[in-house]
Image (cartoon, grey):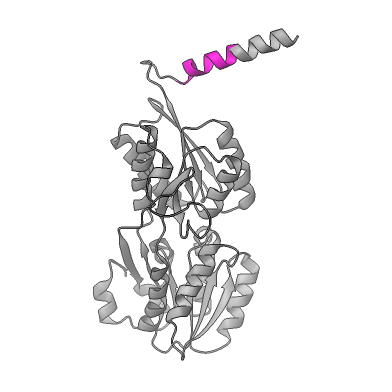
Amino acid sequence: MKRRTFITLLGAAAAWPLAARGQGGERIRRISVLSHLSENDPTAEQFIGAFRLRLQELGWVDGRNAAINIRWGAGEDALYAKYATELVAGAPDVILVATTAAVMALKRASPVVPLVFVGVVDPVGSGLVASLARPGGNATGFVLFEYATAAKWLDLVREIAPAVSRVAVLRDPTIAAGIGQFAAVQTVAPMNIELSVVGLQDASEIEQSIAGFARGSNGGLIVTAAGFSVNHPDLIVALAARYKLPAVYPFRFFVNAGGLVSYGPDPVDPYRRAADYVDRVLKGEKPADLPVQAPTKYELALNLKAAKAIGLDVPHTLLARADEVIE
């Protein structure tokens, strides 16, 4: 019995390299993806589509010399853990992964499978890499933005709504990025601005906290980048509109969903750049030797309809700087 089992396993192992080759005998490289979004999220198609397109430009075509395997984590830690185990079991050559929580799940599943990350704010503070210049380990990639960006959100709130004297910062206190983004805002807040915090973890708690905050006068919101906010833009935008609170968001898609103003990096560009790193890993380079890179494109987006709904006149100076204005 033991001998037959050994032969069966040996035969399966010998057949694996044959199964992993294309029709022309070219080896098919396994590229896995662990997304932080839901499959039916409109932005998911933009992000993954940009990644696929850039891979094709680099010569990696799904079904020909590459096999792309995607899992949708939907911002849920339990799904990250489940899919991390599944993807690692498939012996991928490299994994594209979005957000700190998903990267940590994959690093727990395997300390050796090469990872290229996007959507991570503080990879050093989160323990994902040793340094930005020399990541070490099995992960590298593209930071979402630098903490200095968060400081600019407070300036935007005050510029678009000068009467604001109270600001609630929506952040996730359980991650380094949530703490860091709030600290950046806190550092630049003048004495006449009262800061408070709202946790970004539970929808009902967020609604209760914003409703309580809105009972006071001259309030505004800053929404930081976190798994919950990115996966629930409609909820947060709706709450800001309901209570007529001027709100600043980290990404343009919040403004497209009806939000007032956003300032942050182009969220699609890192996926294109990540494809370049995936290409380099597939060609033999190590994540440990590829420096973590910062965004190269930032954009300011305004929604004039949202401004009118809460009685704001957008300053001409702000309109002149905007990269996108929704009428």
Relative side of 83 to 96, left or right: right
Q: Quadrant of residue 28?
A: top left
- Residue extending farthest bottom: 192
Image coords of residue 307 (percent x, y) = 38, 77
Mostly what secondary structure, the magenta segment? helix
Image coords of residue 66 (percent x, y) = 41, 29
Quarter of the image where the N terminus is located: top right
Q: Nearer the viewer, residue 48 or 215?
A: 48
Q: Does the magenta run of residues contain 248?
A: no
Seen at 64% across and 75% down, the residue is 208
Q: From this viewpoint, is residue 74 visible?
A: no
- Residue extending farthest left: 320
Relative side of 56 to 186, left or right: left
Q: State whether residue 189 is above or below residue 151.
A: below
Quarter of the image where the C terminus is located: bottom left
Image coords of residue 281 (percent x, y) = 39, 37
Seen at 53% across and 72% down, the residue is 170
Q: From this viewpoint, is residue 162 visible?
A: yes
Q: Nearer the viewer, residue 311 or 126?
A: 126
Q: How many marks?
A: 0
- Residue extending farthest right: 1
Q: State whether residue 133 is above or below residue 25.
A: below
Seen at 62% across and 52% down, the residue is 77
Seen at 56% across and 76% down, the residue is 197
Image coords of residue 206 (percent x, y) = 60, 71
Find the magenta span and give its range.
Answer: 11-20
